[in-house]
Amino acid sequence: MLAVRIDRYGPAESLSLVDVPTPEVGPRDVLIRVYATGLNRLDLLLRDGEVFQVPLPRIPGTDFAGEIVAVGSEISPSRIGERVFAAPILSCGVCEHCKAEEDNLCKYFGTIGSTINGGYAEYVGIPARNAVPLPDQMDWITGASFGLTYATAAAMLRRGQLVADETVLVLGANGGLGYAAVELARSMGARVIAVNREPQSREALLRLGADAVVEPGPDMASSVLELTGGKGVQLVFEHVAAATFEQSIASLGLDGRLVLGGVTTGTRAPLDLKAVFTKRLQVLGCRGSGRKDLESVLHRVNSGEVRPNIQQVLPLERAVEAHQLMESGRILGKIVLTV
């Protein structure tokens, strides 16, 4: 089968288009013929190896949609032919966290595309419980566009306890995760300040529902305080991390919360401890999303309440170009590869 694989850490050009054997199906697994796979920032982080490192070679791709073509010995053959998309989080399925649909807290937490091979391929084998039925009216490309970003954004907003009429500052709003957070927060009745440095994305974010757009950098907190009458925001949606963390803390108001769901620019950042105790701040971690978040987002996407912004669709063979586009920062929303 055709696949795009990470054989060595490095730039986009280090991705290899290869012919590899079709995966064997384990007893509790299904084999999926992939038709579309969505790019995520995680793919870039895995490829460059600066923040995360996994055993190589590895086929990336956390979000994908396709058709079940074979099943393991413990899975009902009736699932063959089922249209599905991938639930990105791997877990045991039997612990207290998994039973509570908080599988992102499972001791055996993993992610498709990093822990095991993912959807940058014609076929992929995954646990049957991670193959979620795709609604009949939903196309492959849409099905490959929300599993990680929208569910993670929903989990982060839930963890950050966002409620209507609060103001949330969304970092990295021009990427898939930030874009999803802007749309979801707005649908919850919150005021949204989006952080984005790309001029061409500003108007699109305002049309999406952002109340204001500010640029990242040393003046970000000052801009936020000016927009909020000096009060600061109630919640910061942070996943950029090292490059923005100090300004994010400074943007919070009294009793503010910062929810951290990623470390795109690095794992170490200065922390103003005085601000933490004088403003009674909370810093909340969020590791991925639970099944309850994925199911909530699936319903909202299927009903049209939220709509993933598919910015670019390219064939799998142009994965290098797709990675370069994402790294350029010129893309607002999702890039999807067709297989």
Image (spheres, helix red, strand yellow):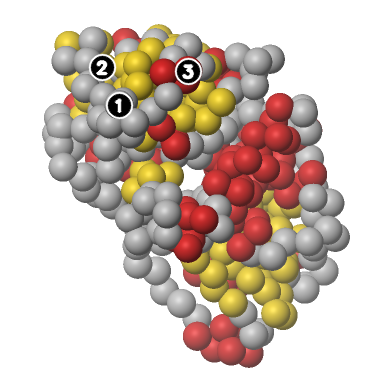
Name the kind of residue labelled 2 in the image: Ala
Which circle, 2 or 3, is nearer the viewer?
3
Q: Could you tell whether 186 is left or right of 179 in the image?
A: right
Which circle, 2 or 1, is nearer the viewer?
1
Name the kind of residue labelled 3 in the image: Ser
Q: Could you tell whether 153 is left or right of 8 in the image?
A: right
> Mark number for residue 3?
2
Establish if 336 lies above or below 231: above
Give the Cα separation between the discs numbered 2 and 1.
26 Å
Q: Could you tell whether 195 is left or right of 112 in the image?
A: right
The answer to which of marks 1 and 3 sits earlier in the sequence is 1
Q: Secondary structure at mark 3?
A: helix
The answer to which of marks 2 and 3 sits earlier in the sequence is 2
Depth check: 189 or 287 in front? Answer: 287
Kindly identify which residue carries mark 1: 73
| Residue 273, horizontal then vertical, whole percent | 50, 85
Give the Cα separation between the discs numbered 1 and 3.
12 Å
Instruction: Name the residue: 35% across, 61% down.
Output: 107
Q: Secondary structure at mark 1?
A: loop
Residue 23 lies in what quarter of the image? Answer: top left
Depth check: 44 or 250 in front? Answer: 44
Establish if 285 lies above or below 53: below
Name the kind of residue labelled 1 in the image: Ser
Establish if 178 lies above or below 219: above
Whether residue 238 can be seen here:
no
Establish if 325 lies above or below 168: above
Q: Secondary structure at mark 2?
A: strand
Instruction: Name the residue: 58% across, 23% down.
Output: 134
Kindly identify which residue carries mark 3: 78
Depth check: 243 or 131 in front? Answer: 131
Q: Could you tell whether 55 is left or right of 43 in the image?
A: left
| Residue 117, horizontal then vertical, whole percent | 27, 31
